Image (spheres, coloured by chain):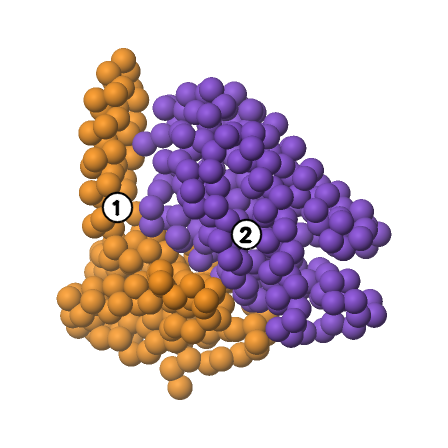
Amino acid sequence: MGNELQEIDLLNQVNDEAAASASRALSKLIDRPVDVGISKANVKRVEDLSPLIGREEVVAGIYLPVTGDIKGAALLIFPKETAFTLSDLLVRREPGTTRELAELDKSALKEVGNIISGSYLTVLSNVLQIKIVEHIPNFSFDMFGAIVSQIITEFAQKTENALVIELEFLFKPETLKGYFLLLFEVEQLKAMLGSCGGGVENLLC
Amino acid sequence: MIFQRVLRTTEMSDSDIEVHMGDIAVMKGAHNLITSGVGSCLVITLYDPKLQIGALAHTMVPSSAKRETEYGQCLSACLSSKTSSDGQACLVAERVSTKTKDTKYVDVAIDQMLKGLEAKGAKRQDLEAKLIGGANMFSSIASDDIGKDNVLSAKDKLKAEGIRIVGECVGGSQGRSVEFSPTTGIVTVKVKF
């Protein structure tokens, strides 16, 4: 649904720019190259969010509620090993040291969430000329399915479809991955894409 | 013991049937019903020990009532704005009608499970319910606890339908995976830590 729509194409262009900004921020933070793997924006049923990771795989999830002209959620996902490696880098431990996440690690990872989400949303806000407010990060270290479904459920209460933006970060030299998901209420989509000059009436309701 | 807690990864065998988020399954036979990564969602199992049949729902949100009202308003708006195409209006109307059967809602899922089980001969007074899930994965967000609402909604609905709750593993801030045997009624809950 929606792939062929001009509005989504337009959003994908904005997405590319925002993704590049977010990856630069992450790269600076951990002082190593970060590539953007998958980068796509789409409208889909909230239940059909693509399974990026196995539902039972343990991940660190950093969730930031988003309000302002558009309401939504930003969710940063790091698989367990990525979270441990990032903690080593952020807290300046020997590589391979972190085997569980202490409060300091969680705090550092939340800050990563803040920075990535902030740099992405700043681009989105500037290009679309809309006000976006990012709230304080919340942290969970548990099954991917349980974490992501809570965010999906928040949306399922309010809306049928969500605008889903998915980003995949690849860290070098290790083949580590991180995922950034942005969801916006579909009712807000009209306003958001309207700012780009596109009509999305046939998407809504 | 009502629940077995084991610390291992779910290994799905050929005889397992996975129930996805928002879906229900009604089963008689040797296949286990499994569902994984349950956070704020609520898994509801119904079991008839006499007939040895069971049903499992992986629900997401408490009640369909509010949503239907919103859809009604949305439909009116769409119908008035989309006068150019009858096809579009019909499409919207059809989606509204399918919404009333949406098993992602706790109340609708319980209704549909009861329908399925009664069609197979189960009697309401024999049924035993178990509830699993309803966690809050981000415990720092206390204001909007959908998990808790899901549990309360299920308890209210089951009480109204006259169905006993014989076990529950709900709340907290932990993800769960569930395996349910419709033959024995045994529910196995798995956690990661």
Q: Nearer the viewer, mark 1 or mark 2?
A: 2
Which shade of the palette goes to chain B? orange
Q: Residue drawn 56% across and 47% down?
A: A181
Q: Position of residue A125 (x, y in %)?
A: 53, 36
Which shade of the palette goes to chain A? purple
Measured along the vertical axis of the image, is residue A187 above or below residue A57? above
Secondary structure of the residue carrying tag 1 is helix
Instruction: Give residue A147's mark.
Output: none
- Nearest to the observer: residue B52 or residue B115: B115
Q: Is residue B116 left or right of B179 when viewed as pictured?
A: left
Write down the quadrant of residue B146 in the picture: bottom left
Q: Residue drawn 57% across and 59% down?
A: A61
Image quarter (top left, top right, bottom left or bottom right) of the C terminus of chain A: top left
Q: Position of residue B110 (x, y in %)?
A: 26, 59
Q: Position of residue B182 (x, y in %)?
A: 37, 68
Instruction: Give residue B67's mark.
Output: 1
Q: Label 1 vs label 2: CA separation?
A: 25 Å
Farthest bottom residue in view? B1
| Badge 1: chain ID | B
- Nearest to the observer: residue A54 or residue A26: A26
| Badge 2: chain ID | A
